[in-house]
Each structure stands twice: as structure tokens, then as C-alpha cells.
Image (tube, coloured by chain):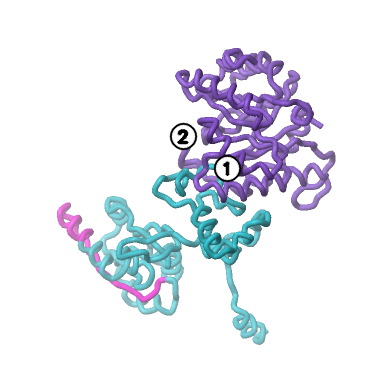
Chain colours: A purple, B cyan
Amino acid sequence: MSKFEQALAHKDFVLTVELDPPRGVALAPLLELASRLAPRVDALVVSDNRGAMPRLSGLAAGARLAAQGAEVILTLTCRDMNRLALTSQMLAAGAEGIGNLLLVSGDYVSLGDHPGAKPVYDLDSVQALGLAVTLASGRDLAGQELDGAPRFCLGAVVAAQSDPLPPQLIKLKKKAQAGARFIVTQPLTGLEELQGFCRQTATLGIKLLAGLEVADPGQRQGVVGLFKEIRGSGLVAGAHLSMPAAQDDLPALLDACGL
Amino acid sequence: MIVAQRKDFEQIKAAAADFRKVLVVGCGTCVAVCLTGGEKEAGILAAQLDLASQIQGEDKSFAVACVERQCDLEFLDELAETVLDYDALLSLACGAGIQLLAERYPRVPVLAGVDTTFIGINRDVGLWEERCRACRACVLTTTGGICPVSLCPKGMLNGPCGGTRQGKCETDPERDCAWSLIYERLAGLDRLENLSAIVAPRDHGARSQPGRQVHPAYLRRYSAHE
């Protein structure tokens, strides 16, 4: 069982932060930032070409973070990899000591800065969860026996603000059935949004992590306030914090949140 | 039907620049319905090319022919004598028609005058919409007659991604989310249980390119000769 899975099982409130690998090969600043964040959170979520913009591989960055003792949740997107590539990334993650995966469809390529790229989506996120479960069982999707099986705590995402919401909930249920142990929401804008969503998902019995994002510095106070409200509400199993435009400020955000 | 759009005129003119006598070959089926490559559009393109060459003082000629279907050898045969008089054929058929024309007349250069866009429907005069990706694994029975493979940019089979807002797609606020449409339709038919089972990954092996389809009667006919 990964450290994060243990935290999910035993702690009242887990905390994760999102880290983007560099757009380039300069990994040292990320490793330094991660070394300051890791002791303060339950896991570091390493993104995978977030926003359909290419960066150094999340697997490579995640492996280095795991090697320095951090608990890593590796994001893998169906947008950029077919089932063969996802299989090899998952096996590599397992071999590098990464025990948690966050499996997502991925923003469409036209939303990023390489809009002419060929989108893959060989699997969707539900099927990617199925792939990870299959690998954990000791076989690949072709039924071939693996020389050593990985073990993962699996996560997926949900958009509480999806409109209409019912089809999103149908898929959420499938994600839980397919093996997701935790679900991270896309960035929330208010407590009411979360309350409404939780009323509709109460019966699913999922461990929900509230996604909170500081998209620009002006939003920081609001996000800190919302974090405290959400933590106090007892609605969720934890929170996932991100500052995509200024991730170096994540330690200060944790300070402001009283963490 | 197959939908196509005409290439940019300058691009066509540049492609035809090396040839003195060019036959613009229209197709009377799909591309005629989508007002791109039928007899009328072939005539307009030939006139445009002719005018452009006159302005540049070139001694060129552009003629027009139109066949019923360029994707069928039976209809291409009728051009056999005509093509002998031309240096190049400028086809306005879909990619399939252009290729069969090239195959049928191996000694004549064939130029493409259109870009084939999709398999779609005729929504209105002058409006066509994509509806099929020819994926060889039709899911329309379970998805309420609405195709997630062609209408969802991600081709999702198990439900929507997280990008749906007010029933629209994250890729374009004007584009309906296929999964919102599927949900509404199945809810209206009281058939939402169609969506409850996890759909396995698609078998892309069945889609190995290029496709080939043989009618059982064709097999019987030719195996009888062996």
C-alpha cells in the first residue's frame, strides 16, 4: 500500500499539491521546491503536459522526486499516449517507486500551444484505470504475463461544474467501478458548488479531493478562504492545491492556509 | 455522403502551372451535392483558371468533363479517349475518386482540386455536418443514434470528459457536447441503462488501413473459378 493510500485510509484530511515539470531540462529548481513541499503534504501530484503544452516527462520528473523520498502521484493523460505507451509508462512508474497514478483524458490539443498535434485518446480515463488494474493483476491488456507487477493507488478527476452534470456522474460511477480510490475535482469556485456536487455523489462512497487553484496572485486570498471553508465543512477527504502560474509560491500558499 | 471543400485557388493554379492542357474532372455524386466538385463547380474552376492564364498571357486551355462517380471504374472508362488530349487531369472528386482516376489513367498526371473533409449529412443548402468516422465498430445502438466517435473530439466511449459547459464542448463553445446529446436522448427514451456498463477499449486492429470489404457473393463467384 502506498504512503498516500495509507494517508487516505487513516487521515481525516489529506493534502496534495500539483507540480509541473519544467519546459526544458532544468530539473534542479523542481527538485528543490519538492524537497520543501514533500514534508508538508501527503503527496506531490506531477502533471503530464498540463493544458496540452509539452514539458519534461512527468514520469522522468516523478522518478527523480520519488528517488529523493517524496510520495508521488503521477498524472498520465490519454491524449498523448496509446495503450502501449500508457502500459510502458505505468510499468516504469511502478519500477521507479511511484505508487499512485492520476489517470485523465487530458485537455484537447487545440486548447494548448501545439494545436496541430494528433490527439490520441486510444483509451479513455475509465479504460486507462482498467489498464492499471490489469497491470496490477500481473498481466498486460494482451493477457501476457508481466515480469513483476506494479501496485498502484489509482485516482481520477471529475468536473463538479460540468453542465449537464448527470452524464458526468455516470462516468464518475464507472471510474469508481474501474478502480479509482480517490477522485480529484477540477478547480472549485465556491463551497456551494461542492455542496451541490456532494449531495449528488454521496451514495458513490468515493474519497473526494477538492481541487483548488490559484490561477493568478489576486485569487490567493479567496482560495485560502475557500480552502478553510472546505476543510471545515467535512464534505471531502482532502484537498489538492495548484498554482500553475507560480508554483514556487506553493510553500507560501500552504503557510497562508495554516498548513 | 462524402463532404469535401475546394482547395484555395492559388494552390490549384500553382499545381496546374506545369501543364498546358488541363481537363477539370468533376464528379456527379457526393461532391456535387456539397457544391464542391460537380459539373457546375468544375465549369467555374475551369473558367477561373482560363481567365487567370489569359491575364498572365499564357497559352493554356482548360476543359471540363464530369462523370457520374469517379470512385467507380465503370464511369471512368468514358473518359478514355478524352484524356489523350490533355497534359493533366484536375480532379474535383473526393480522395477516393481522385485515386481511382489516377489508377485508371496511369500515364497522365492527376491533380487534387479539393480537400476531402468528412462523411456527413446535408443539414441545409450550404451546410454539412460530420456524422461518421467509418470506425468499423458502430456503437449507435447503445448511444441513442448519436455517435461519440465522430461527434466527441476525444472519441470517448464511457461518457463525457470534464470539459462540458452548458452542453457545449471544451474545444468550441458553439459545438454540442456529444455526451450531453446522448444523455438527453437516452433519458427521453428511458434507456439510460444503456450507459451503465463500462465499454472496453476499441479494437483498432479491425481498422487497419487501408480497408477492404468483400461481399460473400463475390467470394463465391471467384472461389468457384479456382
> Judging from the image, what secondary structure is the residue with disc 1 in?
loop
- Residue under pointer 1: A79
Give above or below for A106 relative to B65: above
For badge 1, the amino acid type reads: Arg
Q: Residue at x 29, y 59 (%)?
A: B19
Q: Quadrant of residue A229?
A: top right
Which residues make up the magenta segment?
Answer: B48-70
- Residue under pointer 2: A113
Taking A25 as reference, is A65 left or right? right
Q: Nearer the viewer, residue B222 or A152?
A: A152
Q: Nearer the viewer, residue A19 or B6?
A: A19
Q: CA distance from mark 1 to mark 2?
A: 14 Å
Q: Residue at x 61, y 41 (%)?
A: A199
For residue B55: magenta? yes
Q: Quadrant of the C terminus of chain B?
A: bottom right
Residue A259 x, y percent position in the rendering: 65, 16
